[in-house]
């Protein structure tokens, strides 16, 4: 008989939330993690007293009450609000595009003037926009597209914006008021003790094996659990049998500046010139309102994808989505496999969406209304019960 109900591959947000939920329902979970730490790509590390977002900046935001309540079981959030700036041809602009940006560009100072100016600039199509470029042109016109979107998008995705879906930029708001909060969600912040600490707390009392690559002993691990929850790259799980999926990856160049108390005056500055090779500069101390005589900054350079690099973003173009669809079908036939998270679901998920998906996946496996009555506040083990859905 298998030793665990769930062998969970990956200790990122999906794996940790799923493990927590199923453990609390009385199931036996084992979490395997290739890396030396939990937390996946939201891992933070303290260097010289500054918490560094090792795999790029992570700002938690959500409009889901249940997700906000859930994460606050494991940490306290600070009051950080993301208000990035854009650097283009030596000038700084307010971003995301808002009334201050339009004031800086065209001198308009009221929502009405802004709307009138935009109406003159918009490119009118007699059909639905077919790609990212057309969508942006139809919303804000060519000038704004050239300053804020084209260079950044070409650098970041290493593709023409004409080959990309508009959904990539539709994440970023366009506002005709002075609100420069990057997100439109009511809840936002960064865990005061870092994401890794939050994930560690989620995993409290759960068996986690770090430095353990599932693929080094795949058959062994598959036999250890009745089901496998896989949060890594789906093409890797199936030995790339249907071809490789494309992800976007980054090279983070981090510098310690011993004598600089404040390098750029903000956590995030985007560099939208095509000629500047990095897309943004992060100054980590601003995420935590940390005062120190020194600072740490990271430049983000997009890098061509190779399968030995760390995948950060799925490339959801038609070709890759089709390959993914076929892998998904293989996963369905596998029967014992649950896929979750940005890599395994091949979706440009935000952190709150991953957590929401993990809560739903746990609920699907063992709905709480079907749980036995808790004894002294703890759920009884369900091992003898069959979880919802068939074990194969
Ligand atoms: N984007 C842009 N200029 C910017 C910021 C974003 O053109 O200054 C576009 C770009 O295509 C990017 C997308 O908007 O991939 C989504 O940006 P977001 O900041 O959400 O990306 P992330 O922080 O996830 O890398």
Image: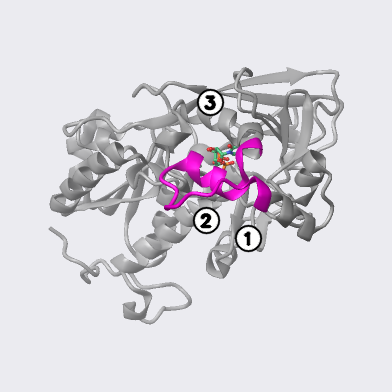
Q: Please tell me which residue is depicted at 80% across the width and 38% down the height of the picture.
A: 290
**Residue nearer the viewer, 93 or 237:** 93
Asked whether the beta carbons under mark 2 and mark 1 sit within 8 Å of each other, the answer is: yes
Tell me the quarter of the picture where residue 33 sits.
Answer: top left
- The quarter of the image holding the C terminus is bottom left
Q: Please tell me which residue is depicted at 20% across the width and 48% down the height of the picture.
A: 331
- Across and down, in percent, residue 211 comes to 40, 30
Q: Is residue 376 visible?
A: yes
Dot 3 or dot 1: first in sequence order is: 3
For numbered disc 2, what is the local secondary structure? Answer: helix
* Position above or below: 164 against 66: above
Q: Mark 2 points at which residue?
A: 352
Q: Please tell me which residue is depicted at 64% across the width and 29% down the height of the picture.
A: 272
Give the left or right position of residue 252, taking residue 105 as reference.
left
Q: How crowded is mark 1: few (under 14 residues within 10 Å), some or many (20 or more)?
A: few
Q: Mark 3 points at which residue?
A: 155
Asked whether the beta carbons under mark 3 and mark 1 sit within 8 Å of each other, the answer is: no
Point out the stretch of residues depicted in magenta.
119-143
- Across and down, in percent, residue 179 comes to 75, 55
Q: Mark 1 points at which residue?
A: 185
Q: Where is ligand 1, by quadrant?
A: top right
Dot 2 or dot 1: first in sequence order is: 1
Classify mark 2 as within 8 Å of ligand 1 or not, answering yes or no. Answer: no
Asked whether the beta carbons under mark 2 and mark 3 sit within 8 Å of each other, the answer is: no
**Residue nearer the viewer, 135 or 360:** 135
């Amino acid at each position: 008989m298998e030793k665990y109900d769930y062998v969970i591959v990956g200790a990122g947000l999906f794996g940790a939330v799923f493990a927590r939920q199923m453990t609390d329902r009385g199931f036996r979970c084992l979490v395997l993690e290739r890396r030396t730490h939990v937390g996946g790509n939201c891992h933070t590390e303290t260097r010289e007293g500054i918490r560094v977002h090792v795999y790029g900046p992570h700002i938690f935001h959500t409009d889901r009450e249940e997700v906000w309540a859930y994460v606050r079981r494991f940490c306290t959030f600070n009051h950080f609000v993301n208000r990035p700036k854009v650097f283009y041809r030596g000038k700084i602009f307010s971003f995301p595009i808002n009334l201050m940006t339009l004031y800086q560009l065209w001198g308009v100072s009221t929502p009405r003037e802004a709307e009138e100016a935009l109406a003159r600039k918009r490119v009118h199509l007699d059909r639905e926009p077919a790609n990212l470029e057309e969508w942006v042109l139809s919303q804000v016109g060519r000038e704004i597209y050239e300053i804020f979107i084209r260079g950044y998008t070409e650098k970041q995705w290493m593709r023409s914006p004409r080959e990309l879906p508009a959904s990539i930029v539709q994440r970023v708001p366009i506002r005709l008021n002075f609100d420069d909060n990057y997100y439109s969600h009511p809840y936002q912040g960064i865990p005061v003790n870092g994401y890794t600490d939050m994930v560690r707390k989620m995993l409290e009392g759960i068996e986690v094996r770090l430095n353990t690559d599932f693929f080094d002993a795949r058959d062994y691990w598959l036999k250890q659990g009745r089901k496998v929850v896989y949060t890594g790259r789906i093409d890797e799980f199936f030995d790339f049998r249907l071809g490789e999926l494309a992800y976007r990856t980054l090279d983070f160049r981090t510098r310690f500046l011993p004598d600089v108390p404040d390098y750029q005056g903000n956590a995030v500055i985007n560099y939208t010139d095509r000629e500047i090779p990095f897309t943004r500069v992060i100054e980590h101390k601003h995420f935590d309102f940390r005062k120190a005589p020194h600072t740490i900054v990271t430049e983000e350079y997009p890098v061509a994808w190779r399968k030995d690099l760390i995948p950060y973003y799925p490339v959801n173009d038609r070709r890759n989505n089709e390959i993914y669809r076929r892998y998904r079908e293989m996963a369905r036939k596998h029967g014992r496999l649950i896929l979750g998270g940005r890599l395994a679901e091949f979706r440009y998920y935000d952190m709150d969406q991953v957590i929401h998906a993990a809560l739903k996946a746990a609920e699907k496996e063992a709905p709480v209304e079907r749980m036995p009555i808790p004894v002294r506040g703890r759920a009884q083990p369900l091992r003898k019960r069959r979880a919802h859905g068939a074990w194969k």
